[in-house]
Amino acid sequence: MNKNNFTKRNINEKDVYEDQIEGRNAVLELLESGKDINKIFIEKGDKQGSINKILALAKERKIVIAEVEKAKFNSMAQTENPQGVIAIVPPFNYCDIYDIIELARERGEDPFILILDGIEDPHNLGSIIRTAETAGVHGIIIPKRRAAAVNSTVAKVSAGAVEHMKIARVNNINDAINTLKKEDIWICGTDMDTNKYYYNQDLTGPLAIVIGSEGYGMSRLVKENCDFLVKIPMKGKITSLNASVSTGIVVYEAVKQRIIK
């Protein structure tokens, strides 16, 4: 993980690079997932609602809890509304592509994978992870360069779904596609320059769906490496959708076809 995606802290502890998760839902999901948490910071003040459940779970797991004044808490926060809680965690543990495929096999399901070709907005990445997790996607593949990595914003926007999603971070998307093809997984690209609508394409069986970047779509080489392309019909004056919205539309068509099948 890139050094810039870590948080450097020096609050009564050694100077180390760590990551942080912010927001009540995201921290609750983190606590319930059983994953490692180094420390939880709580903003001083009245404790109402889900913050009490967070405190109870943290005490049950014997996680260090520190209350800090509002000004200091806000200076620590990386998101606009941390909701009074920040969890300091080890760096996100990316997986290998084969871990995703193995998960599908363990579940007795055809691999269902997302490939994100240059999603740069962490809010989009978080939304896509949330959609993927609810849809039963086995894993997501993202590139190491020129793309958003998993950070506190991504974790919060995903509403904690990132804690339940396998994510592989690779040097080269085309190499990853070739690896999937060797495992007999079909590669579906999303692109406006095709005649086939997504709902007219068979999206059952072992499948990886490629979503291009917000501004430029899929790169030329990635597009050429896809087995087939699909598009979403556009009836208005705006000819593109937000990447996370496009993902939801195509992914849930695949889910529907799998259920009907």
Image (cartoon, grey):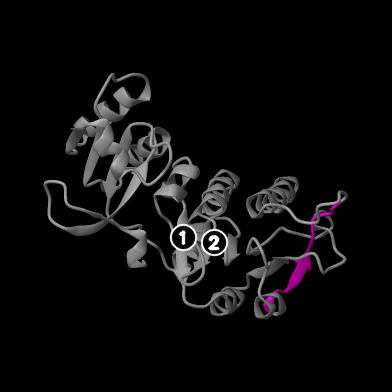
Label 1 CA crowd tier, 10 Å (few <14, some 14–19, many 20+):
many
Q: Which residue is mark 2?
A: 120
Q: Give the image quarter of residue 186.
A: bottom right
Residue at 26% across, 28% down: 55
Q: Is residue 230 magenta?
A: yes
Q: Residue 148: x and y, percent? A: 49, 61
Q: Main secondary structure of the magenta part?
A: loop
Whether residue 20 appears in this view of the structure is yes
Q: Is residue 229 magenta?
A: yes
Magenta residues, start to end: 225-234
The one nearer the camera, 136 or 14, is 14
Q: Which image quadrant: the N terminus?
A: bottom left
Rendered position, 87 above or below 218? above
Q: Which residue is mark 1?
A: 167
Q: Secondary structure at mark 1?
A: strand
Amino acid at dot 2: Glu
Q: Give the image quarter of residue 201.
A: bottom right
Amino acid at dot 1: Ile
Please give the label number shown on residue 71.
none
